Amino acid sequence: MEWIYFGTSIAILVTMVLAVVRGLIGPTIFDRVLAVNMFGTKTVLFLAVISFLSGRPDFLDLALAYALINFIGVFAVLLFFQSRGVRREAEAEREANK
Amino acid sequence: MDLVLDIASAVLLLTGGFFVFVGGFGVMRMPEFFTRMHAASLTDTGGAALILLGLMLQGGLTLVPLKLAAIFLFLFLTSPTASYALANAALLSGVKTACRNETGSPLPENQPDNATSRPATVSRAKASAGKTAAKKVSRKAAPAKPAKTAAKKAVKKAARKPAKKTAKKTARKKS
Amino acid sequence: MMTIVFSLFLLTMLVIVAVAILRTDNLFTAVMLSGIFSLIMAANFFILDAADVALTEAVIGAGISTVLFLSALALTAEHDRSPPVGTWVPLLTSSALGGVIIFATFQAPRLGDPNAIVHQHVAPWYLEKTPELIDVPNVVTAVLASFRGYDTLGEVFVVFIACIGVMSLLGRVRPRRESIEEDEFDKRTDNLRHHLIPRVVGKMLVPFIVLFGLYVQFHGDFGPGGGFQAGALIAAGVILYSLVEGGPRGRELVPEWFSSMLVALGAFTYASVGVASMAMGGRFLDYSVLSHDPIHGQHMGILIIEAGVGMTVAGVMITIFHAFSRRGIR
Amino acid sequence: MELLGLYNYFVFAVLLMIGLYCILARTNIIKSLIGLTIFQSAVFLLYISMDKIDGGTAPIIQEGVENQVFANPLPQVLILTAIVVGISTTALALAVTVRIKEAYGTIEEDKIQEMDREL
């Protein structure tokens, strides 16, 4: 069973590497955000599998915490873009009024 | 019985690992943002479900399977929501035009139904995205492309002003 | 063996991401990459058997750090316009430092060496005496709250002072708006109310996050957790609510007087436990005298001071977030 | 194998170098702050690397399990508090940055110095 856990965690790790690569090259900003989000989900899975691999499944609390708050960052990003759009609009209007 | 459980969870874990890997591969290889997102969000849910189910079978009759179920539930809720939020932000910023198009055919514009619901953000963000798109394409693509984007930019510039006016109007109406 | 394989993956990723952060000009990209950086760091801590630290890094890195950096970016600038300066002086300085440290590491004990000096000194004593003197399963909580409670008191006050600094810099009074129009912008930009799906799901998760925060707070004696993690989690729940419903609604949910009172109350609770133990004939922060039974006294003391820590951390994080979000568009 | 056991420390040194370089070479204040957080994380990594013992587990005592080897709890306690202190001090620095932006209109150190000289 241990080797199964090990294989699964290696698969997840390789996926994490791919996500990081996407985060590094990703042409648009959103690709990077996508990479962060995906990396977060993979971290949840990784922590869950590792806690079984190390024989202490009571450490699932960590994965649970991640699953709960991982997406707050994406909300912050959404809000950031929204306010940036409106702010630029406001600046353009101010310029036009001058 | 233990052996059956072990085999079942091994199959689930390995399939889940494979799914997760395929998702990563898709994120790596897909040509543009929305297709990448499709790969990521689908396997985020599917692979995660398989892996967590496989672990659940190993948990025995303790608190562990419950915790795993909670993790699954929260992932199931948050992951698509995050994908939605991200896709929305990308659409509002006009990512579509910023992506490479393999065939070279003209890219579809974002539809104005967004413009009526959130006028100011859309028109403004589109314009700025057009600029970055022009920059990016001219850096990367074949020399024929910059001319095209420049033309598109000009069209946009012309289109921006009236769009903004209607935007203001709708904003006032709302308030 | 497996630890080393995982470490190879994670640490190499860590270095690559750090280099990418260094090289990018776009600050938004840098913030996103530092989010990945902190995720890798947390996974790494977990590999290295530090469950409590991994939980802290997870909550802080995923829930709070990104949000704070993004709100600061929204208030300042998005691009790093550093000129391409002559970089050889910093390069020389940092590589000299790195060279010295790498030279020194050849003397260091390898990873996981049980004979390393770190494991000989006071740590075995903590591990041995915790079941006997304090009797909580989580040794980290025991050391944090009881054996080294004085240290933790200092840390709590550092956090407290940092919060006062942020409050006095960004001000509690809302900057005056020039016109009603700008308020309109605020209303349109500082919430996600018109995004139906994030709004519903986000609001649905807030109670779960707070509930899980309370679980971490009070389960900290038995599993990974404690006041620091719980405070950050609860603050993350409130921050989520404020992101979804907008700053003003968030400030209605947790008013500023309340969050700043939490900060002070938590630190006060912690210190007053110390004073109470002095009054009952023990030394400062010696919980054994709090009850007729020393072990029971320890349990009581740890529970109270962890609650104090949780209150302070939650209050500080919420206050800081509100201070940034209130600054708004200028 | 010997060198592989020291890999954590090498990564610590490299991260320290990257963080320091970022602080020194970049004039943008927020970028410097991100460099500072990398520097901080490098130190956390060093401490946590020291607590690992072969075949050990996290220092949470399980009921009914004999002869467990536990990781060293002391570095964990130090770093646990340091992470929270680190984020609050970073928030303080960000607040200062916001005020600098409001006062000077820029967050580039060289431009701020130019403005100061003109005064």
Image (spheres, coloured by chain):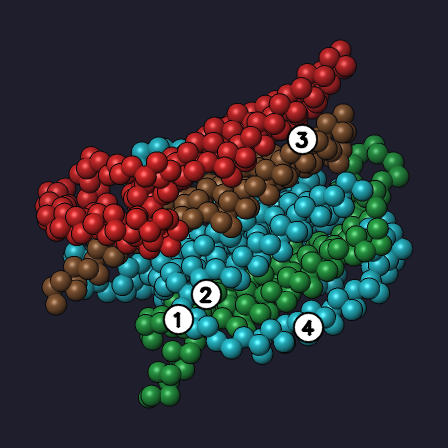
Chain colours: A brown, B red, C cyan, D green
- Residue D97's image quarter? bottom left
Please give the label number shown on residue D107.
1
Quadrant (top left, top right, bottom left, bottom right) of the N terminus of chain C:
top right
Label 1 marks which chain's residue?
A: D
Residue of label 2: D30
Dot 1 lies on which element? Answer: loop
User: Is circle 3 on the same chain as circle 4?
Assistant: no
Circle 3: residue type: Thr
Please give the label number shown on residue A8.
3
Report, in whole angstroms, how far the alpha carbon at label 3 lies from the one at label 2.
38 Å
Residue of label 4: C97
Circle 1: residue type: Ile
- Residue D116's image quarter? bottom left
Q: Is residue A6 above or below residue A36?
A: above
Within 10 Å of disc 4 (Cα), the crowding (few <14, some 14-19, many 20+) is some
Circle 4: residue type: Leu
Q: Of D62 and B71, which appears nearest the observer?
A: B71
Q: Residue at x 73, y 60 (%)?
A: D10
Q: Residue at x 88, y 39 (%)?
A: D67
Circle 2: residue type: Ile
Q: Of C91 and C232, which appears nearest the observer?
A: C91
- Badge nearest the viewer, 4 or 1: 4
